[in-house]
Amino acid sequence: MRYFISFHVLLLMLLSTQPSIGQTIPDQSVTAVLWFQRSAEYRALCYQAYNLAELRAKEYLVNPDMEKQAAVIFDIDETLLDNSPSEALNIIDDKTYSQERWKVWSDLASAAAIPGSLDFCHFLARNDIQVIYVSNRQNTESMATLQNLQKWNFPYADRNHLYLKSDASSKEFRRNVIEKQYNVILLVGDNLSDFDLVFEDRSVNFGYKTVDSLRFELGKKFIILPNPMYGDWTKPLTGERKSWLNTKGK
Ligand SMILES: [Mg+2]
């Protein structure tokens, strides 16, 4: 399926010599999707992130907390599951993101695992560190989401370990609930807002100042995966409240 889609993405790129009004965002997405699907560098960055995550988990295991159950919080989309075929289909169909189009894709429960993610999750499970899934997918997607995770045998893929979006897009409240129960040793995501509330505001200089101030947490407690296709980083580029971005940043 992905080979078929990629071929058409390439074809579309070659043919789209005269972009019209309204095609700007899909056209820009072509390179992002191709890089995600076909660059060895993308795979290398994923392995690098998960190698570092395992190193940090091993450091924790030298002197584990005996009072509180350890856990790692994971985002799902573009952190554990690869939804680039959905992005490619948007390009082919000359559409932008919508909840309806996304739901059709997520119901298929056929997203592949991100390189390195499954091995790391199994490493955690073998060492009695629980995996917690925190995603901005809708609650109506819970069954298909678990089905997709279970398809690849991700550990702890059950309702007790899954925190989907209810009201707020911010994950802060869900993280606070989880941290009452668990010793969260790492957070893994493709969007900085997967880590902490402070990263959500990109209104001043793209949020660089916040990243600079917390740079020593990156690779330490926060493990970030590459995602050039979508995310909060696009907000200051396209306008904060553009409708197609409102519900994105899964
Ligand atoms: Mg994500």
Image (cartoon, grey):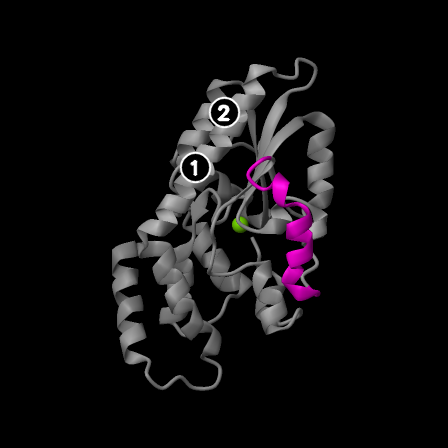
Categorize mark 2 by other alpha carbons within 10 Å: few (<14), some (14-19), many (20+).
many
Residue closest to the eye, 201 or 98? 201
The amino acid on which the numbered mark 1 sits, given as a three-letter code, is Ser
Q: Position of residue 191 (x, y in %)?
A: 57, 51
Residue 121 vs 39, above or below: the answer is above
Q: Where residue 1 sits: x, y (%)?
A: 28, 55
Expressed as whole percent of the image width and height from the top left, the position of residue 6 reads: 29, 61
The residue depicted at 54 percent of the width and 18 percent of the height is 128
Q: Which residue is mark 2?
A: 124
Say if the magenta span includes residue 162: no
Q: Earlier in the sequence, mark 1 or mark 2?
A: 1
Q: Secondary structure at mark 1?
A: helix
Residue position for label 1: 117
> In the displayed structure, does residue 171 sit left or right of residue 99?
right
Q: CA distance from mark 1 to mark 2?
A: 11 Å
Magenta residues, dominant SS class: helix
In the image, is 10 to the left or to the right of 76?
A: left
Three-letter residue code for mark 2:
Leu
**Farthest top residue in view:** 66
Give, as a single range, the part of the protein colored magenta: 203-220
Left of 230 or right of it: where is 13? Answer: left
Q: Is residue 171 above or below residue 65?
A: below
The percent coordinates of residue 233 (x first, y second) are 58, 61
Q: Which mark is residue 227?
A: none
